[in-house]
Amino acid sequence: MDTQQARPRPLTADETGVLAALLAQHFPGVAELRQQAPHALAVPGCGCGCGTISLIVTDPRAPQARTLDSQPAAVDFSAPGEGGVITLIVIDGLLDELRMSYWGEDPTPMPSPEHLTT
């Protein structure tokens, strides 16, 4: 799939739950990122077929976050036959990506929030 041509769409329930888990952590800028979350749309973020998504914040008035780095939060996931980590990416103070790194050979879809471990 050409991720540059994908039409932005609302986040799925699993994507919304993962983003909420990441934003439940405490780090500089998280309050502003929480305000951006309801205005986020998703497009596939990787061509391999994994659950990585790029985020587009649609509200131009959304407050920009001042995070200490571009990867302020991460959460592990574990499900039968798969596991890995999902990292929140922030660029220019805006939600930018939920990046998946998985341990198996096959691309892993976005896990359900109940498979997250902290």
Image (cartoon, rainbow, N blue to C red):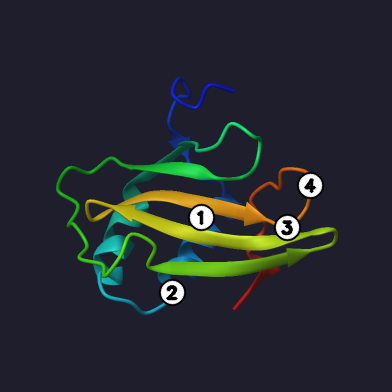
Q: Which residue is mark 1?
A: 16
Disc 3 packing (10 Å; few <14; some 14–19; many ≥20) = some
Q: Which residue is mark 2?
A: 24
Disc 1 packing (10 Å; few <14; some 14–19; many ≥20) = some
Q: Which residue is mark 3?
A: 103
Left or right of 30? Residue 44 is: right
Q: Is there a contact, CB below 8 Å, between mark 4 and mark 1?
A: no
The residue that appears at 17% across and 57% down in the rendered structure is 63
Q: Which residue is mark 4?
A: 105
Quadrant where the N terminus lies? top right
Seen as rendered, the residue at the extreme left is 61
- Location of residue 33 in the rendering, given as x and y in whole percent from the top left corner: 30, 61
Cα distance between the residues tagged 4 and 1: 25 Å
Q: Earlier in the sequence, mark 4 or mark 2?
A: 2
Q: Secondary structure at mark 1?
A: helix
The residue that appears at 50% across and 38% down in the rendered structure is 45
Q: Nearer the viewer, mark 3 or mark 1?
A: 3
Amino acid type of disc 3? Trp
Q: Secondary structure at mark 2?
A: loop
Cα distance between the residues tagged 2 and 3: 25 Å
Seen as rendered, the residue at the extreme right is 81
Cα distance between the residues tagged 4 and 2: 30 Å
- Location of residue 106 in the rendering, given as x and y in whole percent from the top left corner: 77, 43
Q: Earlier in the sequence, mark 2 or mark 1?
A: 1
The residue that appears at 43% across and 69% down in the rendered structure is 73
Cα distance between the residues tagged 3 and 1: 22 Å
- Location of residue 56 in the rendering, given as x and y in whole percent from the top left corner: 35, 41
Cα distance between the residues tagged 2 and 1: 12 Å
Q: Earlier in the sequence, mark 2 or mark 3?
A: 2
- Location of residue 68 in the rendering, given as x and y in whole percent from the top left corner: 26, 70
